[in-house]
Amino acid sequence: MRIHDSHRRYRTNTPVTADPRVALAGGLALLAAAIAVVMLQSPLVLAGTNVVRPVNVTLGSVPGAGSACQTGETLPAGTTVIAVSLETTAGPRVAVTALSGGSVIAHGESASGWIGKVVSIPVAPLKRTVRNVTICVSFAGANELMLFLGVRRPTRNPARSDVGVLPGRLSIEYLRPGSSSWWSLALSVARRMGLGRALAGTWIVLLVAALMATSIVIASWLTLRES
Amino acid sequence: MRALRRVPTAAWLCVLVACLNAIAWSIITPPFEVPDEQGHFAYVEELARLHRLPSSGTQEYASDEQTAIDDVESWRINLQPLQHALASRAQQQKLESDMASTAASSSAGVGAAGVAATEPPLYYALQTIPYELGASGGVLYQLALMRLLSALMAGVTVLFTFLFVRELLPSTPRAWTLAGLAVAFGPLLGFISGGVNPESMLCAVSAAVFYCLARGFRRALTPRLALATGALTAAGLLTKLNFVGLVPGVLLGLALLAMRSSRTLGARRAARALVPALALAAAPVCAYAVINMLSNHHTLGIVSGTLASSAGHRSPLGEASYIWQLYLPRLPGMHTDFPDISPTRNLWFNGLVGDYGFEDTFFPRWVDNLAVIPAFAIVTLSLREAYMNRSALRRRLGELGVLLAMAAGLLILIGASSYLSFPAEAAAFPEPRYLLPLTPLFAAVLALAARGAGRRWGASAGALIVVLFIAHDLFSQLQVIARYYG
């Protein structure tokens, strides 16, 4: 009888269907774990900046390839990213070099393909803060005008580019990993989310969570029902 | 109503998910941090207050809107990814007090509509309803209500995407739901539909047009369906100028369907279905042209201006080469327009993985690299399915051609617009959000991928694709939260 059964199953030619519940449950569990791991990370925080608000303006532009250097910068200890204000629509690789007393103390290069008004360039962190640093950026391979952005004002140490002395200083920000994880920052992030809107209050975060949780429950149920 | 009753429950649930997701996005994204939201809001404001279309494209907004923009400090946050949203109770109190006083004041006046000034008015006209409803609460209340209307449009997009896939793959109900859910969780659709931006409605109208054409190819072009397609085409042209890119494909589709109908119903009946549809589709363009001619403007407004600039802008071959390279690898003999980047990968793929805020919020590069793996798997599975069913595909070449013509028309339009700024700007318009009108085609690829996994693994692959999009959505929201509130 058993032989007959297995024979019949073979003959019907119906493939065994993998259980979609396993895929769904496994996928959602993996997602929850990934979110938990990401929340254990620390965000990058501002270690230093020369940016003076209110707003960056165009100090100059170069077509395709160019460079600019700015003296009098302070490179904070632990900096892992130097963010320079350049503007483009299809950014080329940008190299940044930090020089102190003529020696290179940090160097990094961004990937190409960035867009917007800020390019973030990873660098190896230093153990101590170094003052009077010269920051140089250089790029090649852009097929458009690259704009240098910064604060236009008279200064003793203006940025200098291939096209001459710029009428101000390039905006540069220095980032390092913070000491707090996203988990420990969750409450302050939630409080901040509750500001600057019509219906203010931290409760708004719970509303977002409820909306997304409901969506996921509906989607999961529907996926299994239709499988 | 009867047609609505025939829509499967699964479709309505997908619609609900899309709306909930877009509402979540509307809360997460701070006011005026969706691309050009200030201008879109100002357009609605002028339409509601003066009952006229905006005439100025400057960025001098009405005083109440400008106060809100100043108080939420958009000028500090836009395009500055290291700048976060408001952080103190004092800032919130100032915002609330200013909102209360500007809502009570009757002297806010009107301003210009910024970059939105050249857009057609249909979306903005609809947005005057929530604008008026929220008038007593001030600009931020109005903005929140207007965002909710956009969120509803995400639901409409998903509804028609579901129905489109149902027409394409009628024998696989599982694929309809998968496509609907994947689109409902699409973070870019959620982000755009969570803001005040006519692209939310453009997506909805485009999805409806895709559905009508697919229905026509599967069944027949009835006069009612032709009229609906014509009306939707008119609505698309009145929603956003980008819809112009889809029009050649829509016309091709209607022509093919009419030819097919003429074989079975006779030429006269086919023409009776087609002519009113074409007249309806062309009506807004004709009206617009007449208004412009009477007011001594370019016949087709900004479109005429763009065509004139395009004609005077270097060689057609150079333009064709540029548009090709914007999407595909450069061919031998072409001038190198993008020397250091791959637009397909850097601008389009990475942008679809994550491009939020004012094009200032992205994932780290390793996430873009990781995303290549599931994208490759999905494309491979869908190609496998297409290959396995190549004989069926051959029978539907006309339909396939129409869908490709619609996609190509939009891509060429984006490329041509971008070329106008080239080489001062290498890629002025390649923003992934401009691809959102092609959402039904993306959904079809996903549905094919689930089928391509085979009968044994198809259901699991479908479940994994849904989880993939949930994950993409949640991480995108977290990325935006980190950028503005971290």
Image (spheres, helix red, strand yellow):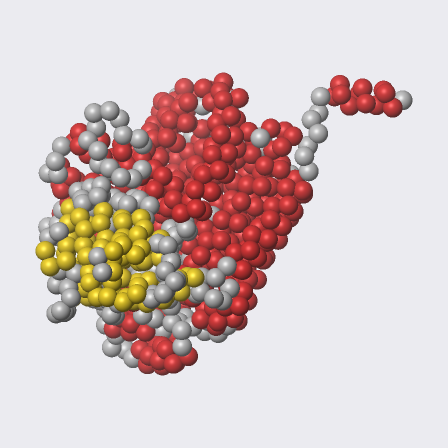
Identify which residue is drawn at 13% across, 60% down.
A166
Asked if residue B333 can be seen in this view, the reply is yes
**Residue A224 position (above or below residue B327):** below
**Residue B362 position (above or below residue A227):** below
Identify which residue is drawn at 53% across, 59% down.
A39
Front-most of residues A43 and B51: A43
Residue B64's image quarter?
bottom left
Identify which residue is drawn at 38% across, 58% down.
A125
Q: Position of residue B162 (x, y in %)?
A: 51, 41
Q: Position of residue B27 (x, y in %)?
A: 45, 63
Q: Quadrant of the C terminus of chain A?
A: top right
Asked if residue B136 can be seen in this view, the reply is no
**Residue B67 position (above or below residue B383):** below
Q: Quadrant of the N terminus of chain A?
A: top right
**Residue B340 position (above or below residue B17):** above
Residue B123's image quarter?
bottom left
Q: Position of residue A31 (x, y in %)?
A: 57, 50
Q: Position of residue B421 (x, y in %)?
A: 18, 45
Residue B402's image quarter?
top left
Q: Residue furthest right?
A: A1
